[in-house]
Amino acid sequence: MRGPSRRIAQAAVTLVGAAVLVWSLQLLAPGDPARRVLVANGVGNPTPTQVAALRAELGLDEPAPVRLGRWLLAAATGDLGRSWRSGAPVAAELADRLPATLRLAAVALGFALLLAVPLALIAQHRRADLAARGLVFLGAAVPSFVVGTLLLEVVVVRLGIGRVLADGSWGGAVLPAVPLALAAAAVWARVLRAAMLEVRARRHVQVARARGAGRLRVLLVHVLPGASPPLFTAIGMTVGSLLAGAAVVETIFTWPGVGPYLVEAIVARDVPVVQGTVLLGVLAYVVANTLADLAAAAVDPGRAR
Amino acid sequence: MACRWLSVLVVPLVLAACGTPDAPPREDAVVRVVTPYTVRSLDPIAQGLWSPEWGYGELLMRATEDGRVEPWLLESLEPESPTSWLLRLRPGVRFANGNPLTAEALAAVLHRHLAENALVRDALGGGEVRVVDERTVQLTTPRPVGNLPHLLADEQGVSVFDPTASEPAGDIYTGPFRVRSLTADELVLERNPEYWGGEVRLDGARVRFVPDPQARVLAVRSGEADIALYPPTEALARFADGGGPSVAVAAQPLQHLRAIPNLRKAPMDDLAVRRAFALGVDYRGLAEDVLGVPYRTPTGLFPDVVDYALPTQRTDPAEAARLLDAAGWAPGPDGVRERDGVRLAITVLTYGSQPDTRTVAVALQSQLRPLGFDVAIASVDDNYAAMRDPAGWDVGLSFDGTLGYTYDPIGPLRSFLTTGAQRNFGGVADPELDTLVAQLEASPDEAARRPLLERAQQIIAANAYVVIVAQRASPAIVGETFAGYRPSSVLHHLGART
């Protein structure tokens, strides 16, 4: 029980530390935030009086530690502040976009698993290993935006399959999920392949073979479960980045998720949105990795120690 | 085994086909537009500018494609004096909710804008509104506002809405369309059955907000959109060969790429250097050879669409060289001119949100090098912020219309070129120009303004206070279904006649 408790405590500390770093973004942002808000709201050339009034309203004149403390308390209750561009609560805007991102992440994870596990299994065959590794390297080397752009140009525009303007539906998630899945599967397949090679050398696998278990049964029943903990860790890391919004792929496919929301906020220097989105990503990353660690420990208790 | 692997490839494609463009049923006369700019709300003050752009609202005055400003919801706009105007409404104008637009409603609208709209407050602050009769309102301003017709045609100015409406809604405006729905991704419009202006040709419109420029272009190519607004310049060339979607360009080039000399430091504080810069630029080459469609060659401060435009700009490298020689700038060993040991080196500012500024800067570097200019290029994020600092730049490139989108020469002159004005980045301080602008503001009579405008152009050109290096008309990529569509020069993308 100590193991899980310690991991959860570590996750909480990581989250708070990351939140402080995320908030510090505001201190590094160029220009006066109050002026940016006014310009974003149509005041082309705000006067010093307007800027000063808004600075007071936003609490920007208070000392940084006070502002940080206030922000952390608010964030803990789900209040991520208001967007400097739209004036709407960041949490509400994120909540509107999160379902689409979750949908895309789920489809991408499904595809990635469907690709990674068979590739790792194929790689256990000496002659097929070379081809499988070639595919894996290709998947890892080609950037997602190149795959995405090719899919749009060839599959959507020339073949007429799928949509350029994604609608956030399950059907619409298939094409954007492909570049995400390829990138993830490439990493997962390598991790799983290496772990399977290690487990194959263990005594219980040799015993199973000696007792006459078939090749596929040995791989699926005796090797794969023992090799899965590193895969869980890799999945945990991928889930975190997908839930933060696969910004480039979501933008290319106009996916109505968190990714384009973050990109637009970065371009517009909408600091509360950037802070909120990054914090969500950190939260997803920490939770997914903690769950992955706990799952790995459950499958292979030796790792927990 | 091979079949199984084939199925892994085919199944996703079949699933993807579930999301093909025929998902939403296609109405007969509905145009689908993609644009980078999001309509965030239907609030008539904060987001009222979108209502005339997308045809669900209208303004009191409007700019036309041929360079005029004419009454729109108004029947007439008459000056009683330089500080008093009578605004007379057209008869029979109704909002989409059926309520009539009366003088009382207009007075309430003007009061709301004077209280809450920064642009209106800045231009007409302290103004008083009085209802004269059922269709007439008197507007009195504390100072002369000679360009009031243009201000009332500005989309960021007085958007007209039903002041009795309890909250912003899709039917509180007067346009040929009303808003059926607005989400973070899409604005859906339908024909306004109460429209006062007669027949509306389209059944409706779907306006999708797509920030990614390549995605907008692809959307037209894939048939998911009929019109892509604000396409990237580099994407236009591929549509030149005919067949499929095509490039359409607005009639008037109202977007101007200014080269703003920094008069507050050397070498651009030297008139000879500024004039040599202006004469050394190959305007035709920039527009036709470097930038291409939708750029046109500028001939002066204002585009030819206004009759007071003077051809004050020309390319004459020989004259430029003579000016520099006479001012003591002699060619150095590497061809760069020098005076008193100081090289003729200038830094040109470009900015990311207008990537064409970088292209122009590179071309200027090449064009001005034979004259002896050593041009460095600096890219900044926010050009206005960078130009507010007198250090670090000599010429700032900036896309700003010299007439805005309402053919208003006075507002841009005042904000960019009068002493101490907030956008006077170059530090121009010319008493004669200040006086001319003040006289222009005090004069509602167009004929009386003409000589003043001509003199202002002569002063600006003689001193090279600003150089228009390129002018651009709004382009759009248009699908075959709407092949006759031409982008609006004045940003009225949809209307009753679309």
Image (cartoon, grey):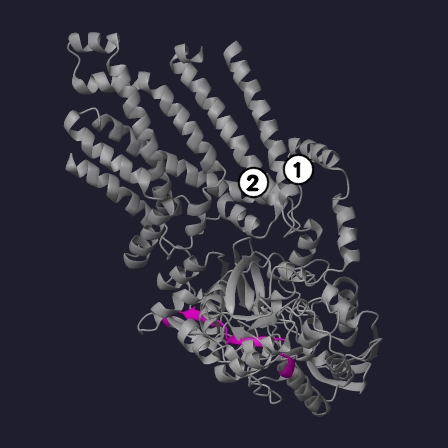
The image position of residue A121, as x and y in percent, is 24, 26
Q: Nearer the viewer, residue B290 or A142?
A: B290
Classify mark 2: helix, strand or loop. helix
Residue extent of the magenta highlight? B462-480
- What residue type is disc 2 on? Thr
Mark 1 residue crowding within 10 angstroms, few (<14) / some (14–19) / many (20+)? some
Q: Position of residue B440 (x, y in %)?
A: 74, 83
> Residue placed at 46% from the left, 18% from the top?
A294
Q: Position of residue A72 (x, y in %)?
A: 67, 32
- Name the amino acid type tagged 1: Asp
* Residue B26 horizontal side relative to residue B91, left or right: left
Residue on which disc 2 sits: A277
Asked which quadrant contains residue B495, the reply is: bottom right
Residue A281 can be seen, yes or no: yes
Mark 1 lies on residue: A79
Residue B400 counted in the magenta span: no
B433 with respect to B63 (left or right):
right
